[in-house]
Each structure stands twice: as structure tokens, then as C-alpha cells.
Image (cartoon, grey):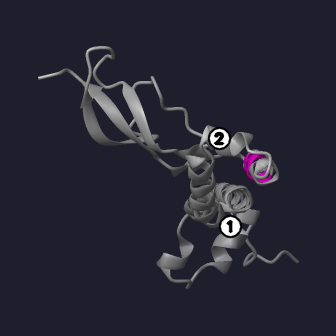
Amino acid sequence: MIDNDKPDTADEAVAEELKGVPEEFLSDGDDADEDEEVSVEDALAELRSDLEKANQDVLYAKAEAQNVRRRAEKDISDARAYATTGFARDILSVADNLGRAMDALPKETREDEKLKGFVAGLEATQRELEKVFGQNGITRIASMGLPLDPNQHQAMMEIPSDEHEPGTIVQEMQSGYMIKDRLLRPAMVGVAKKPD
């Protein structure tokens, strides 16, 4: 015997099953799939954006770490190169006084047989001091006959002169020194000017 209550097709069977189900639950399933695809694409785009931002942050952090390392290496290098600056500045007065003593010795004293040993000792001390300066990168600044360089010379007075161009150094009152490429002490000089 044939059951007439059974639907003839599968669609009719599904329709029969869905009788009594509220309408909001029966909306087209394709819209839900599209919403799900759109939200997945949005989430994927957001994740890509977050990843790109994180990559940029990592690059900035690496660059900053490299800059900090370079600055630290430079600071260490400078500390090694210029560690003796304070001591060198203090010892310059000893060199100045030794130079003044040598300049003050009269010719007769230098030739006196009794004082030759003393003079030779002073000269040897001066040579040794200059050698030590050279070994530590301390060099004397050239001044006489050169134009005034405010980075290395300190003008103490102007001297009227017809023989020299204005601004030319014609007198050195105190020697100046550099330590490597830094100024240790400026040379104190007198500079030519046009006579009045």
C-alpha cells in the first residue's frame, strides 16, 4: 500500500520538515556564507596590518639598538683616546716652565764647563717630555707667521705692524697644544694690525 502522506521529492520533504520553524531562522544560507567570508577577509586584512606594524616596530627597535651600540663604542673609544686630557693639561705648565728655564739660560752659562752637565740634563728632560707628548698624541699648535685661527689661537693683543698682514700672528706668549684632533689649550698670541 502506498503512503500518500509522504512527499514525492526531497525538496518537498525538506519543506515538510521546516513547517512550524520561525521565518527569521529560514533566511537564505548564502548571505551567512558571504558575511562569514567578508568577516574572515576583514580579520585577515587586520592581521596583516598588525603584522606589518609589528615588523616596523622590530626594525625600529633593531635600528635603535644598533645606534645605542655605536654611541657606546664611540664613547668608549673617546674615553680611551682622551683619558689623559686632564693630566696632559696639567703637565703643560711643567713644559712651559722648562721651556722658560731653557730660554732664560744665557749663552755663557750654556758654555760654562761647570754647568754643561746641568744644561745637558735640562735639554734631555725637554726632549723626553716632547717625546712623551708625541707618544700620547699631544702636538704643539703652529702659530708664528700664520693667520689667526680662533679654533686654535687666542688673541691677547694687537701689535701695529707694517711688515705683516693684519690678522697675522707676530708674537706667541704661550704655546697651544692639541690632543689628537681636540684642542687641549689654545695658543695665546699677539696679532698684527695696521698702524694708526
At 32% from the left edge and 14% from the top edge, which residue is drawn? 163
User: SS of the residue at dot 1?
Assistant: helix
Corner quadrant of residue 165: top left
Compare residues 43 and 60 and report the one nearer the observer: 60
Q: Amino acid at mark 1?
A: Glu
Compare residues 19 and 139 and report the one nearer the observer: 139
Corner quadrant of residue 54: bottom right
- Position of 101 relative to 40 (above/below): above
**Residue 106 at what x, y percent from top left?**
59, 43
Magenta region, residue range: 121-130
Alpha carbons under labels 2 and 1: distance apart: 138 Å
Q: Is residue 145 magenta?
A: no
Which of the labelled discs sits on residue 108, or is there none? Answer: 2
Which is nearer the N-term, disc 2 or disc 1? Answer: 1
**Residue 181 at what x, y percent from top left?**
61, 43
**Residue 63 at what x, y percent from top left?**
66, 54
User: SS of the residue at dot 2?
Assistant: helix
Describe residue 180's horizontal placement relative to residue 183 as left or right.
Answer: right
Which of the labelled discs sits on residue 12, or is there none? Answer: 1
Q: Nearer the viewer, mark 2 or mark 1?
A: 2
